[in-house]
Image (cartoon, rainbow, N blue to C red):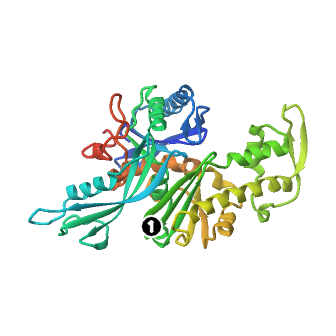
Amino acid sequence: MAKTNLIAGLDIGSGKMTCIAAAHDAETNTLKVLAGKSVPCKGLRGGMVSDIRETSAAVTHILGSIERECNREIGNLFVGVRGSHLESFSNHGTYNISRMDKEITQADMDSAVENAKSMPLKNDSEIVNVITQGYSVDKQRGINNPEGMEGSRLEVDVHITTGSSTHLNNLAKAIQRPGFKIDGTFYSLVPLADCVLTPEEKEIGALILDLGGETMSVGIYVNGILKFSRDIPYGCDLITSDLSRGLHTSRQHAKEIKEKYGVSFPTFLDEEGEIPVPSLDGRSTHNIKKSYVLDIIQPRVEELMNLVADCVKTSGYKNFPVVGVVTGGGSLMPGITEHCVNILGLKEVRRGTVQRDLLTSDDVYFDPLYSTAMSLAIYASDNPGYEEYAGGSYEKGSSLFGKVGKWLKGVDIFGG
């Protein structure tokens, strides 16, 4: 493979960051993953920067390691954000076409979207992403692409995600300090859903749930369109905390026990037996029954799923999701999908990873841990609707998220 610049997807998670680096393989005309890495970050809390120095150090470590491993520089860096400061909602825009020919152009479509974005925002808020949901031409609804059609009144429905300017700028500064530039920023749920959900699932009505350590991201698709999205400021780290207190052991040992022995549904408790638990000081161990771990985990998982259920109830789309897809690190715990079926009332729930036909990669990177970072790389590099999602690039002295997507046109994203 010729040495083209890397395209990197950086997932800003809950107390950690995960990166996937890929490049375009001209011989196979595919996107190929060359490296991946996940590192803890003490400067992040719930997807937001709490310490710029610690976050910059983690950025230097993870991106520097990726560049050294691949022996090439990162040419394009795309960042996925999450957190309780993000808010999503739908809005409507119109544009009157006064030209004699009445033929709708891309410029007319852009103007309609711009009008949909023109609304008062909360103090310290700015638009991160704008997703086109569908168009109407002279009140004819259900039009995906009106370019080339004739009409006098063009209307558009959009799904808008806003975020705190303070949090977004702090993140940008933390990434810029080591000398990296952000070429695009996404609400991480958007590219993740596009790479994990199938078109059929989106069409029939699907709920996607990204289970992180300190946040849970919820999205609802109806008739192929994202209708609702929200981040819940609680996640699977609460399970680790419960185990740490309940077993009288350190958080690190509790995390290891959770990942090795943890189940959240009784049918997954394969056999009753005892497991060793290190004491808080690490100098001794005591044994506990596996069922005791289940007794700690199950109530917390049920509580988290009930939070998701409450979120869905208030979304306005309670009765629309038929199937569910759970992804993220928390999805790996046995029994999670069963709780989704029972508590969320879905007909079918599966564990989701990035679809394998979207790129070439070693199996290790198809782990849910890397799903968001991989989705960022895929979506930014190969999605024809990219300009509907991406924030502008960030450079010193410019607005952090400039005109949505305009910078991409005419750019060779692979830096070849």
Residue assigned mark 1: 199
Q: Nearer the viewer, residue 264 or 275?
A: 264
Q: Nearer the viewer, residue 219 or 137?
A: 137
Residue extending farthest to the left is 100
Q: Quadrant of residue 125?
A: top left
Say what secondary structure mark 1 lies in.
Answer: helix
Amino acid on which the number 1 mark rests in the picture: Pro
Instruction: State whether residue 344 is above or below residue 181.
Output: below
Residue at (79% x, 37% y) in the render:
250
Marks counted in the figure total: 1
Q: Position of residue 51 (x, y in %)?
A: 56, 29
Q: Is residue 294 left or right of residue 149?
A: right
Quadrant assignment for the N terminus: top left
Residue at (35% x, 31% y) in the render:
395
Asked if residue 28 shows in the view, the reply is no
Instruction: State whether residue 161 is above or below residue 268.
Output: above
- Mark 1 surroundings within 10 Å by alpha-carbon count, few (fewer than 14), some (14 through 19), many (20 or more): some
Q: Position of residue 42 (x, y in %)?
A: 62, 32
